[in-house]
Image (spheres, grey):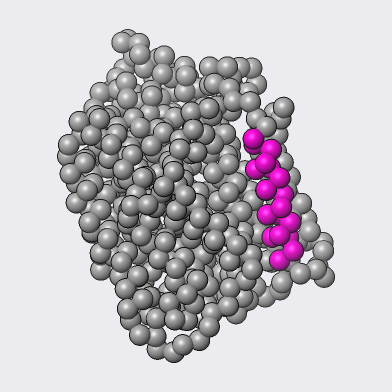
Amino acid sequence: MISPPNLEIAVLVLGMIVLMFEAFATKIDKRILAFAAIIGLTIVLIATFFLTPSTPEQASGFWSFYTADSLSIFFKRFALVTTIFVLIMMIDYTPVLSSSGALTTQPVLGEFFALPILTCAGLMYIVSAIDFIMIFVSIELVTVSFYVLVSFTKKNPAALEAGVKYLILSAISTAFLVYGITWIFGVTGETNLQRVTAAFANSDIDKHAAVFGAVLVLVALGFKIAAVPFQIWVPDVYQGAPTPVTAFLSVGSKAAGFVVLLRVLRPFMMLPNMGRLIVLIALLTVVYGNLAALPQNNLKRLLGYSSIAHAGYLLIGVACFAGQEVAFYLVAYLLMTLLSFAVLIIVAQRTGEQISNFDGLAKRSPFLAFAMLMAMISLAGVPFTAGFFGKFFIFAAAVAQRQTVLVVVGIVTVACGFYYYLKVVRAMYWQPAAKVDNIPVSGLSRVAMSALIVAIIWLGIYPQPILNALKR
């Protein structure tokens, strides 16, 4: 059997190899590095199925900060699949980088492909971290990579603005995280989550200081998952960043934040009023995200506000202690978000990112129009799609916990989602096209999008494979 930490080491080595080839192999087409990275990550993905799950209680010695339980193995696969699809989108996006003047020399392209690999390694470490110190180090590995990726098109003012905003607000978030960990360590003398839980159960500790530290950590995680009121960076960063990076931020960063949130939920819920705080944040997030998305005409900004709304739905699951339901929702969100951004990358190169640029897409490219249709109706939660079961499981958990307010607000805001998602469908199928020109789609992108479409429909009819994977 394979030792779990070896997977992260393999991904790190793969990223370093890509960087070395970028630096020294100057005469090759750098897109070959992306294909090599995809093959390498696929091999690592296959290797995850040979892992033997353990429990956090079994972690000891040097690896006491690391676990390979079923949840972490599941999200390692999640991170690997996300990175593979992002690399495919990056291959489609390379003409945009070249035409924008972001790449003065072709070798820089290797860095564009290497950084997501290093980010993936950070995501894999995050989902296995059961110690606050390891959580902090892993989050920083991911965040520093995103600093560079967001502002990669350095001659684009919007990208530079997005990079600066992300850098400043992420630094503030890091400060909250470190300060919160410091308070928790000061109260308990521990950073390991298992021992922190045991310390919080002790009635002799200073509960007020512990709550203060926990709130600071939640503020930092609120930034990572784009929860209200820590979502201010989302629309501008999503719009300014390269589109594949936006997709990676929307899916990878959010998933990592929620895994950490699920990890710290057990000790934090032992403190007074923490459950009410999460319920309040969930309500604010789901309402703000849906209302702010209603007037949007730029598709990237719409998907940015949409990601805030979906963070709210996921927080409903967190507030109801529904870890399995949250994991399934994240998988559904992965499929439909990556599909929507994959279509956006191709269409935006020919027309633009406005919803009006999708007018008549069904005549220009029936395949891309159908792919975007599946993404939009799944995001909206139409039956027989993965998005429907994602919302259904979350609301069922809320009903079981008698969270009536969360259920009512969640269902009402889902109706808002139908309006702004179906605006895109209306543009593609009912609006006339300004000009009818075929939009070419590469074979690799067509296969990737077809796989996402099949997965969305399959999990919308038979969600059991994901649920069974989480039970192992």
Q: Nearer the viewer, residue 469 or 262?
A: 469
Q: Is residue 289 visible?
A: yes
Residue range in magenta is 31-49
Q: Is residue 166 visible?
A: no
What secondary structure is the magenta-colored segment mainly?
helix
The residue located at (60%, 79%) in the rendering is: 99
The residue located at (34%, 30%) in the rendering is: 321
Rendered view: 124 above or below 366: above
Coordinates of residue 138 in the picture (x, y in percent): 56, 39
**Quarter containing the N terminus:** top right
| Residue 188 falls in image quadrant | top left
Rendered view: 301 above or below 139: below
The residue located at (71%, 52%) in the rendering is: 39
The residue lying furthest to the front in this view is 461
Rendered view: 221 above or below 449: above
Query: Does the magenta portion include 38?
Result: yes
Coordinates of residue 265 in the picture (x, y in percent): 38, 28
Coordinates of residue 37 in the picture (x, y in percent): 70, 54
Query: Does the magenta portion include 135?
Result: no
Q: Nearer the viewer, residue 426 or 215?
A: 426
Relative to 151, 426 lies left or right: left
Q: Nearer the viewer, residue 456 or 302?
A: 456
Coordinates of residue 57 in the picture (x, y in percent): 53, 17
Number of on-image labels = 0
Relative to 189, 383 lies left or right: left
The residue located at (21%, 40%) in the rendering is: 406
Rendered view: 201 above or below 23: above
